[in-house]
Amino acid sequence: MKIDPDRELIEACHAAPPDGLEGPFRQVYEQYKDRVYNVCYRITGNPTDALDAAQETFGILFRKIAGFRFEAKFSSWVYRIAVNASIDLKRRASRRWLASLDHLRDTEEEGLDSGRLDLRDDAVEGPQAAASRHELEEEIQQAIGRLSEKMRAIIVLRYLEGLSYDEIAETLQISLGTVKSRLARAHQALDRELTPVLDRHYLG
C-alpha cells in the first residue's frame, strides 16, 4: 500500500490541540481550499453555493479529522466530503426553491407585487472573443449541471480534478466497474448536450 503523501501532515493535526485554524490545520486548509472550492463550484453551479459547500466541507473535515485513520487516501476523503456537501446543498436549495414558488404563487393570487430575481451577469463585457469564450464556459457548466448528481460528480472528479478511475472509486466508495459505466453514460449525455453548442461556437 502506498504511503499517503498527506500522512505526516494529518498526524500532526492528530497531535495538535483543536484550537482553531492554526498550525497543521491551517496547512491542510491552504493545501486543499482551491481544490475543494473547484469541486463545489462545478457541482453546485454558482459561486455563492460553492462557498457555502466549501465552508461546510472544511467544517466537517476539521470536526472529523481526529478520527481519520488512513483507511482511504486523505485526498479521496476530502473530495468525498466536498461532493456530498455540494449535493446536500443542492438538494436543500431545491426544496427552498419549491417553497419559494409556493410563496410566489400565494402572493400573486393576493395581488401583491412579488418582484423579480435579477440573475444577469453584471461583469463588464470584454472583447468579442473573451465574451464568446465566457459564453461557452457557461454553457458547458450548465450542461454539467443538467447531469444527474452521480454523473456530475464523476465528470468533475475525472476531468476537472484529474483523478484516476481508482481514485474516483475510492472517493465515491463505488466499484471500478461502476466508475467506468457511469462515466460512459456521462459522456453520452454530455455529447448530446454539447455537440450543438460546440457546432454553434466553432462552425458558425
Image (tube, rainbow, N blue to C red):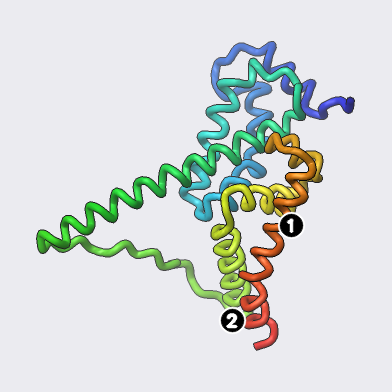
> Looking at the picture, does residue 102 appear above or below residue 51?
below
Q: In which quarter of the image is residue 145?
A: bottom right
Q: In this view, does 180 lie to the left or right of 155?
A: right
Q: How crowded is mark 2: few (under 14 residues within 10 Å), some or many (20 or more)?
A: few
Q: From what the image shows, is residue 74 above or below residue 79?
A: above
Mark positioned earlier in the residue sequence (1 or 2): 2
Asked if residue 176 is positioned above or below residue 136 in the image, the reply reads above
User: Up-down: is 12 above or below 141?
Assistant: above
Q: Quadrant of the C terminus?
A: bottom right
Label 2 sits on what residue type? Gln
Mark 2: secondary structure: helix
* Number of other residues with Cα within 10 Å of mark 1, as a class: few under 14, some 14 to 19, many 20 or more: some
Q: How many labels does the image show?
A: 2
Viewer-proximal residue among 72 and 138: 72
Instruction: Identify which amino acid the numbered label 1 is placed on.
Output: Ala
View extreme (right): residue = 1
In the image, what residue occupies the spot 67% across and 81% down?
A: 199
Give the residue drawn at x 62%, y 47%: 150
What is the CA distance from the residue labelled 1 to the residue labelled 2? 35 Å
| Residue 40 as seen in the image, left or right of residue 74 | left
Q: Quadrant of residue 5?
A: top right
Between 27 and 181, the one lying in front of the other is 181
- Residue under label 2, please give it: 128
| Residue at 76% from the left image edge and 38% from the top image edge | 175
Tell me the quarter of the image containing the N terminus: top right
Question: Looking at this rendering, what residue extends furthest in the bottom direction?
Answer: 204
Spot occupied by residue 46 in the image (x, y as percentages of width and height): 50, 54
Query: Which residue matches tag 1?
Result: 184
- Residue at point 60% right, 41% down? 83
Instruction: Please provide percent x and percent y for residue 74.
Output: 73, 29
